[in-house]
Image (cartoon, grey):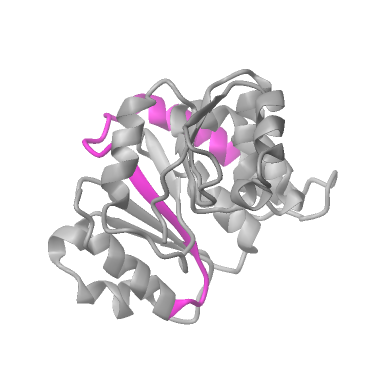
Amino acid sequence: YWYCCRSPGFVTDGFLLCLEKIRKEENRREKIEVMDEILTVLIPTYNRKQQMQRTLDALSRQTDRDFRVFISDNASDYSISDELLPRYSPDFVRRIDVRVQKVNLGADMNISSVLADCKTQWGWLLGDDDHIEDFAVEAIKKQINKNSECSAIWFSISKKTTKDIMMESLDDLIEVLKMNNFNGDWIFLSNKVYNVSAAKKYFEAMFFRLYTRIPHCIPILEMLKNHQKVCVVIMSVLY
């Protein structure tokens, strides 16, 4: 059901169905009970069995175990549920949801769909091949408590500033990007954590702009356009 033409300005019937699904999901979220977990680790993946196992190993070692994992498998040629999950404890596996796409949707659509389907208050987009610290979830949740008024938290990987930065406009983002060449830091996938209730109003814009190849940045651009707070944190949860 997640089909979309990747050319800008051209909307397929499948894309309209995709947007309708987002609207229905937003309505459904209003009715479900709030989950105990505040954070979901959102992992889009395709045919990276070894890297996926390494990422799951790291998540199973987290110092804070109160989180969920949502994996969107983009039609890989192996089964995560059958070949990887049996390695782990039942308690850890219980917190993992795996969705297998019927066909490969392309990386950008898979990234966007896993974020749009997050059902906890906060979602951390994580590439399947990135190395994460054992304290990553603990550190993220501390920053969520510290910056609960923010619509997103950006964990800088470049270490080119000595203090956290609170952005509230596109001009603020431009100033950050000018500072010591933050561009690579900005487009990186795995250092962004989203307040889903604040981000969901921009998911439609995210899907319309898949052609940018950085759909995960679109909600943050829209947040800043509307003067919502986005915090750049100097600590990294990756290595």
Position of 14 compared to 120: left or right? right
The count of marks equals 0
Q: Position of residue 172 (x, y in %)?
A: 66, 26
Image quadrant where residue 209 sits:
top right
Please state which of residues 75 and 54 is positioned toward the viewer in this rendering: 54
Q: Position of residue 71 (x, y in %)?
A: 41, 59
Position of 76 compared to 38: left or right? right
Quadrant of the image for the C terminus?
bottom left
Q: Is residue 231 above or below residue 94?
A: above
Question: Is residue 26 part of the magenta span, yes or no?
Answer: yes
Q: Residue at x 37, y 24 (%)?
A: 148
Position of 4 compared to 80: left or right? right
Q: Residue at x 85, y 44 (%)?
A: 9
Quadrant of the image for the N terminus?
bottom right
Image quadrant where residue 104 sits:
bottom right
Q: Is residue 168 above or below residue 178?
A: above
Question: Is residue 52 part of the magenta span, yes or no?
Answer: no
Q: Residue at x 30, y 48 (%)?
A: 137
Q: Which residues are magenta?
A: 20-49
Q: Position of residue 57 (x, y in %)?
A: 28, 69
Q: Residue furthest front?
A: 162
Q: Position of residue 55 (x, y in %)?
A: 36, 67
Please state which of residues 108 and 229 is positioned toward the viewer in this rendering: 229
Q: Residue furthest right?
A: 9
Position of 212 compared to 168: left or right? right
Q: Residue at x 41, y 44 (%)?
A: 235
